[in-house]
């Protein structure tokens, strides 16, 4: 018996919608409780579906967690790109803005680190390639080759931008409980000076007026 194409399309769309609801609910659950503390029944209840759908679509809670983290990181990569010619200091500002607006991502990253520790990530090769492209873009901005100095620079820039959102309690203890609207500008300026001091070529010829600085977040 031939299936009605319209009915098949409707069923596919419904399945996609259900899967997206599960992913959205799982993102909140994993961000709040980590993979060990997350409950599939809470995810299913929040998504409004039977929890057996989780196993049908994703196979296991572990695989659901991995997909949630992977999709969240893809969103960050799309929202805050780093291209040749971009100002590295303004990149810090854009990453800072993204994490301030989307604190769930950094929480997911912390839970992932606690879960996997030194073990290989399920999609480690793909994610490493993503950062290799960023390192290459940064090196091109600096007018130099990829080197340990450039890779360390990228790690430092990301850490500088993400750390206030990763450990808000430390930010509060150091900076005080009140709002600090000037923090972003200070981090950007610190990054600018650090890059110029550690990579003199960057201060001389690269990273000053970069491409789409200010776009993304």
Image (tube, rainbow, N blue to C red):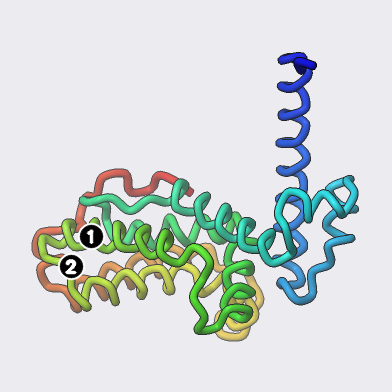
| Residue 83 makes an appearance in the image | yes
Asked where in the image residue 193 lies, by quadrant, the reply is bottom left
Asked where in the image residue 32 lies, by quadrant, the reply is bottom right
Which residue has dot 2 on it?
Answer: 146
Tell me which residue sits at (69%, 59%) in the image: 64
Q: Secondary structure at mark 2?
A: loop
- Dot 1 crowding, Cα within 10 Å, few <14, some 14–19, many 20+: many
Q: Position of residue 110 (x, y in %)?
A: 59, 75
Q: Position of residue 168 (x, y in %)?
A: 62, 75
Q: Secondary structure at mark 1?
A: helix
Horizontal arrangement in the rendering, residue 39 relative to residue 77 (left or right) = right
Tag 1 and tag 2, C-beta contact below 8 Å:
yes
Which residue has dot 1 on it?
Answer: 136
Towards the viewer: 49 or 57: 57
Q: Position of residue 206 (x, y in %)?
A: 15, 58
Tell me which residue sits at (43%, 73%) in the image: 159
Horizontal arrangement in the rendering, residue 186 relative to residue 25 (left or right) = left
| Residue 176 makes an appearance in the image | no
Among the two numbered marks 1 and 2 on one chain, the one whose residue lies closer to the N terminus: 1
Tell me which residue sits at (74%, 64%) in the image: 61
Q: List the single residue furthest toward the front.
A: 1
Q: Position of residue 52 (x, y in %)?
A: 86, 53
């Amino acid at each position: 018996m031939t299936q009605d194409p319209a009915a098949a399309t409707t069923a596919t769309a419904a399945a996609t919608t259900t899967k997206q609801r599960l992913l959205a609910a799982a993102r909140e659950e994993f961000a709040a409780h980590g993979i060990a503390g997350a409950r599939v029944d809470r995810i299913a209840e929040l998504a409004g579906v039977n929890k057996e759908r989780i196993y049908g679509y994703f196979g296991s809670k572990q695989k659901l967690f991995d997909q949630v983290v992977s999709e969240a990181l893809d969103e960050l990569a799309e929202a805050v790109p780093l291209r040749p010619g971009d100002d590295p200091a303004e990149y810090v500002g854009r990453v800072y803005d993204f994490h301030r607006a989307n604190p769930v991502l950094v929480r997911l990253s912390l839970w992932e680190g606690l879960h996997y520790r030194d073990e290989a990530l399920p999609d480690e090769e793909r994610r490493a390639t993503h950062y290799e492209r960023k390192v290459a873009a940064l090196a091109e901005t600096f007018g130099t080759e990829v080197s340990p100095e450039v890779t360390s620079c990228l790690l430092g820039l990301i850490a500088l931008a993400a750390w206030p959102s990763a450990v808000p309690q430390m930010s509060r203890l150091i900076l005080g409980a009140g709002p600090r609207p000037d923090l972003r500008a200070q981090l950007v300026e610190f990054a600018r000076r650090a890059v110029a001091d550690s990579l003199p070529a960057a201060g001389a010829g690269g990273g000053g007026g970069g491409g789409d600085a200010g776009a993304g977040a």
